[in-house]
Amino acid sequence: MAPTPRPQRWLLRKPKGDAPTRLFCFPYSGVGASMYNRWPKRIGPAEVCLIQLPGRENRLRDPHYVTYERLAGPLTEALLPYLDRPFGFFGHCGGALPGFATALHLLREGLPTPSALFVSSQVAPHDGPFGRFLGMTDDELAVELGELTRAMGGTPHPGLIDMSLGVLRADVDANRAYHLPEPVRLPSVVHTIGWDADREIRPDRMGGWEKYAEPGRFRSTVLQGEHYAFLGAPGHLVDVLATGMRRARDEHEGGGTDGSRADA
């Protein structure tokens, strides 16, 4: 078995020690952590920590993880030194399920679990796999990669699209393979974020996530925007994340969960 990459390779930048909470962000299918280049480095009390998965960007030569279950173990090992304070996971569409699988692995191993799990544009694991990407040919996926590249502010180049197509196909295959027979409750506050103009995952398909939260620990919101709107860190999304991470901090400090306190 290949050695686990150094912890810093799993994160685009090493977390600092001064933030009271951390928000770990998982990349979208087929791309790397730099997709969050328009996001702030801090949201509310949380430092934004960008997860870099194998097979892309500075980890281009690292083999793909194949399944979310196989990803969760080494990723947990790399993140563990940084789970020393309240933390959250955020993932959009193809980035949401590896985040959930990692949270579930942490729970089953008796390790710190995310105070908040933010799921954007993805169905619950027992309701999937779902999505039109799952049935696409490579040519169709290449078109989607071009659209994603433009949404990220870049210009699609055939060579780069071809290079990214392999990891996108592997990501889609991992998504297709992931299904839970029944929901599993997490201790996290589970936040679902839908988008009113999203043609990939309609918000009304996300209701199954409520079964993954303990009573009173489920939040659901629908924001204005289309599928890729999250890339620009719109204010209404930042507000949802900041409020959730304030509540995580306050709950940890015993100061209530109304999120009314000023940022640390």
Image (tube, rainbow, N blue to C red):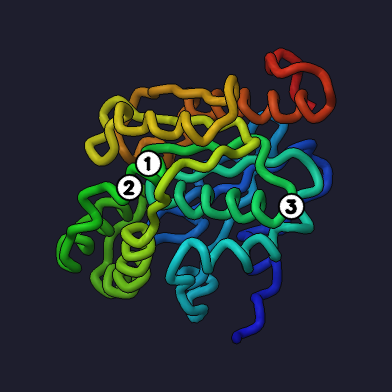
Question: Mark 3: which amino acid?
Answer: Leu
Between 72 and 195, the one nearer to me in the picture: 72
Q: Earlier in the sequence, mark 2 or mark 1?
A: 1
Quarter of the image with the C terminus is top right
Q: Residue 90, how many percent across, how many down?
A: 54, 42
Quarter of the image with the N terminus is bottom right
Residue 41 visible in the picture: no
Cα distance between the residues tagged 3 and 1: 25 Å
Give left or right: position of 191 versus 24: left
Identity of the residue drawn at 49% across and 28% down: 237
| Residue 205 in which image quadrant | top left
Judge the density around disc 3: few (<14), some (14-19), many (≥20) Cα neighbours within 10 Å.
Answer: some
Identity of the residue drawn at 39% across and 33% down: 208
Q: Is residue 235 above or below residue 179?
A: above
| Residue indicated by mark 1 | 122
Question: Mark 1: which amino acid?
Answer: Gln
Q: Secondary structure at mark 3?
A: loop
Cα distance between the residues tagged 3 and 2: 26 Å
Q: Residue 2, how many percent across, how many down?
A: 60, 85
Q: Earlier in the sequence, mark 3 or mark 2?
A: 3
Q: Are marks 3 and 1 in contact (CB under 8 Å)?
A: no
Between 186 and 41, the one nearer to me in the picture: 186
Q: Secondary structure at mark 1?
A: loop
Cα distance between the residues tagged 2 and 1: 9 Å
Q: Are marks 2 and 1 in contact (CB under 8 Å)?
A: yes
Between 214 and 16, the one nearer to me in the picture: 214
| Residue indicated by mark 3 | 111
| Residue indicated by mark 2 | 128
Question: Mark 2: which amino acid?
Answer: Gly
Q: Is residue 43 above or below residue 129?
A: above
Residue 104 visible in the picture: yes
Q: Secondary structure at mark 2?
A: loop
